[in-house]
């Protein structure tokens, strides 16, 4: 059965145009999350020490410009406490990673705002959709501010960004991405009757995968992934000593690297078990349309993500593998959202008409 609604009316054609635009925006955000991971893993995020949303578009063009940027970097703790003696040539790559990350953020704004205005002016946006698109736009602006708020936390005595702000920045990006993706699904997917009993299970899976991504943000922000480069054991045991040893104990879940890594592993084990149970139930049930394809994608991406996670640990967080692990989680969430949407969209055999 087809995934995309038959475009038999101008309204449905407009829906499909907007959906493809939103899918493209989501793909660019996916790339942004990947580049953000690379920027973090290469310790590049604190190389640009000011925030100029408009004037910061032009990179250093001359040797004097580079010297000026390097001089500003030298006034902050990351250089003074970690990178003392770094040469200008060593500075240039980390600066460019952060610069490209910020430029991609600006590009996302452009590819969202201009088509949005076009669709709005030409009256191609169905009733009820405009507020959602405005919310996406506002979310993107908030995400930019949150990114700078995160960077500022590392421009102080301790040259590390706050794990709380990093996790919030990552979580906000994933929420915006998910909202865009879900809205695009609304515009193009067919409706089928599906086993209603499985819909709640699908939503729980998506929620847990999102929480696991937040857990990964804490791992990244505290560098907990370096603490126990072994699997399946953490050091000499499955359950390491010192879990929840801080006072109060709940603080350990956010600040103790042993507890943070252990919790992330437990999230992964729970999700693996639940995805396998969900897959078994759905494939035995009479699911229709593209939901079955979505379940197979979910299983495949789960296997890939587990492989990337274990490899990130045992190979001591190599940049390409760790960055792939970060976006692998987003890909896994995407598959889960698609399957969840198939069940959410299952109230009728008929195709939804525009309002």
Image (tube, rainbow, N blue to C red):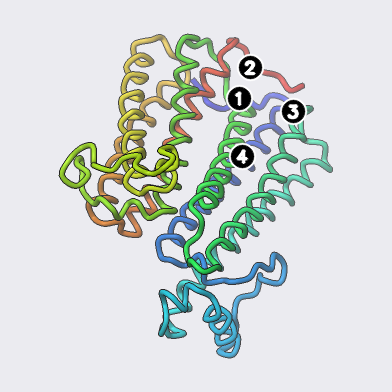
User: 110 above or below 208?
Assistant: below
Q: Quadrant of residue 295?
A: top left
Which residue corresponds to mark 4?
A: 20
Q: Earlier in the sequence, mark 1 or mark 3?
A: 1
Q: Which residue is mark 3?
A: 11
Residue with the mark numbered 2: 351
Toward the viewer: 25 or 314?
Answer: 314
Other residues around mark 3 within 10 Å, as few (<14) / some (14–19) / many (≥20): some
Q: Residue at x 33, y 40 (%)?
A: 305
Mark 3–mark 4 contact, CB under 8 Å? no
Does residue 172 lie above or below 99 as drawn? above
Badge 1 element: loop
Q: Nearer the viewer, residue 18 or 242?
A: 242
Label 2, residues with CA under 10 Å away: few <14, some 14-19, many ≥20: some
Q: Nearer the viewer, residue 116 or 40?
A: 40
Spatial separation of the CA atoms under disc 4 and disc 1: 13 Å
Please rate how many residues cluster around mark 4, counting C-alpha atoms within 10 Å: few if below 14, some from 14 to 19, many from 20. Answer: some
Helix, strand or loop status at disc 2: loop
x%, y% of residue 121? 84, 43
């Amino acid at each position: 059965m087809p995934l995309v609604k038959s475009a038999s009316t101008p309204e449905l054609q407009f829906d499909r145009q907007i959906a493809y635009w939103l899918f493209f925006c989501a793909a660019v955000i996916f790339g942004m999350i990947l580049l953000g991971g690379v920027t973090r893993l290469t310790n590049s995020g604190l190389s640009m020490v000011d925030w100029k949303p408009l004037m910061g578009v032009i990179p250093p063009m001359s040797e004097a410009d580079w010297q000026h940027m390097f001089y500003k970097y030298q006034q902050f703790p990351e250089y003074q406490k970690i990178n003392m003696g770094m040469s200008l040539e060593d500075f240039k790559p980390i600066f460019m990673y952060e610069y490209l990350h910020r430029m991609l953020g600006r590009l996302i704004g452009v590819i969202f705002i201009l088509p949005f205005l076009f669709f709005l002016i030409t009256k191609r946006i169905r009733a009820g959709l405009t507020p959602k698109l405005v919310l996406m736009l506002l979310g993107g602006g908030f995400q930019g501010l949150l990114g700078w708020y995160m960077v500022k936390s590392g421009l102080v005595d301790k040259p590390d960004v706050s794990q709380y702000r990093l996790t919030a920045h990552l979580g906000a990006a994933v929420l915006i991405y998910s909202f865009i993706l879900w809205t695009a699904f609304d515009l193009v997917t067919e409706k089928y009757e599906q086993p209603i009993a499985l819909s709640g299970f699908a939503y729980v899976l998506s929620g847990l995968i999102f929480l696991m991504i937040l857990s990964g943000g804490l791992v990244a922000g505290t560098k907990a992934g370096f603490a126990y480069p072994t699997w399946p054991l953490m050091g000499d045991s499955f359950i390491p000593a010192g879990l929840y040893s801080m006072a109060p104990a709940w603080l350990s879940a956010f600040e103790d690297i042993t507890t943070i890594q252990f919790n992330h592993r437990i999230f992964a084990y729970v999700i693996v078990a639940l995805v396998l149970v969900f897959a078994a139930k759905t494939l035995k049930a009479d699911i229709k349309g593209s939901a079955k394809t979505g379940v197979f994608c979910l299983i495949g991406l789960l296997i890939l993500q587990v492989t990337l996670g274990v490899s990130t640990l045992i190979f001591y967080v190599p940049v390409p593998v760790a960055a792939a692990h970060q976006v692998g989680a987003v890909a896994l969430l995407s598959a889960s959202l698609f399957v969840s949407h198939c069940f959410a969209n299952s109230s009728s055999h008929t195709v939804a008409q525009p309002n």
